[in-house]
Image (cartoon, grey):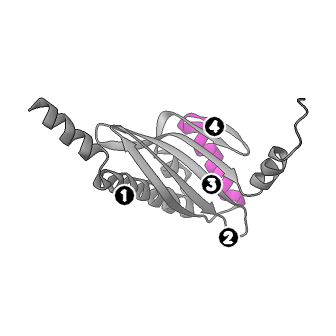
Amino acid sequence: MKLRSLGLAAALITSPAYADEAMTVAQEIVSKWQTAYNNGDAAKVAALYTEDAIWVSPTGIEKGKAEIEKAVANLIKRSPKLTVSAVGAEQNGNVLWYYSNYMFPNGPTGYSGVTLVNDAGSWHIAMHTTTTEAIRPRLLRLGDAPSVVQ
């Protein structure tokens, strides 16, 4: 009986329904983030993060809600509108991660990877990384460089 229960648990964890739940959570967070951002509410964006969250972006590393709020406020001043779409999501217990595309109306476009933790039934961003499309081709060119090791 225990073996059957374990098999059922494994099937539920890897089932499409579990993946669908992860994507639903990701889409909810993306929607809240984008709405708060587009409304110019950096504090509401920062409220989506854990107290000790880290945001790594092309402009630096922000640690904690206060730094993230300040960075988002500065970003809103430069580019007040943003479109974000979740592309894929996975979950393992109280940890969920997703990746997304983002676009500012006048550029740049880019990609994000986000890790969420569930604390008492509420999902919060613990780690957020972003990069811009402009960086990607440069990295590809660096990867194409001939090897100097003989």
Label 2, residues with CA under 10 Å away: few <14, some 14-19, many ≥20 = few
Q: Is residue 75 magenta?
A: yes
Q: Circles 2 and 1: CB distance less than 8 Å?
A: no
Q: Nearer the viewer's eye, disc 3 or disc 4? A: 3
The numbered mark, 2 or 1, whose residue comes first in the sequence reads 1
Q: Nearer the viewer's eye, disc 2 or disc 1? A: 1
Front position in the image: 17 or 150: 150
The numbered mark, 2 or 3, whose residue comes first in the sequence reads 2
Q: Nearer the viewer's eye, disc 2 or disc 3? A: 3
Q: Residue at x 84, y 50 (%)?
A: 141
The amino acid at mark 3 is: Tyr
Q: Quadrant of residue 128?
A: top right
Front position in the image: 26 or 15: 15
| Magenta stretch, residue numbers | 63-78
Question: Residue 6's x, y, as percent?
Answer: 19, 34
Q: Which mark is residue 62?
A: 4
Q: Circles 1 and 3: CB distance less than 8 Å?
A: no
Q: Is residue 17 left or right of residue 131?
A: left
Q: Residue at x 52, y 63 (%)?
A: 85
The numbered mark, 1 or 3, whose residue comes first in the sequence reads 1
Identify the secondary structure beneath mark 1: helix
Q: Which mark is residue 24?
A: 1
Q: Is residue 96 left or right of residue 110?
A: left
Q: Residue at x 63, y 44 (%)?
A: 70
Label 3, residues with CA under 10 Å away: few <14, some 14-19, many ≥20 = some
Question: Residue 123's x, y, as percent?
Answer: 38, 44
The amino acid at mark 1 is: Thr
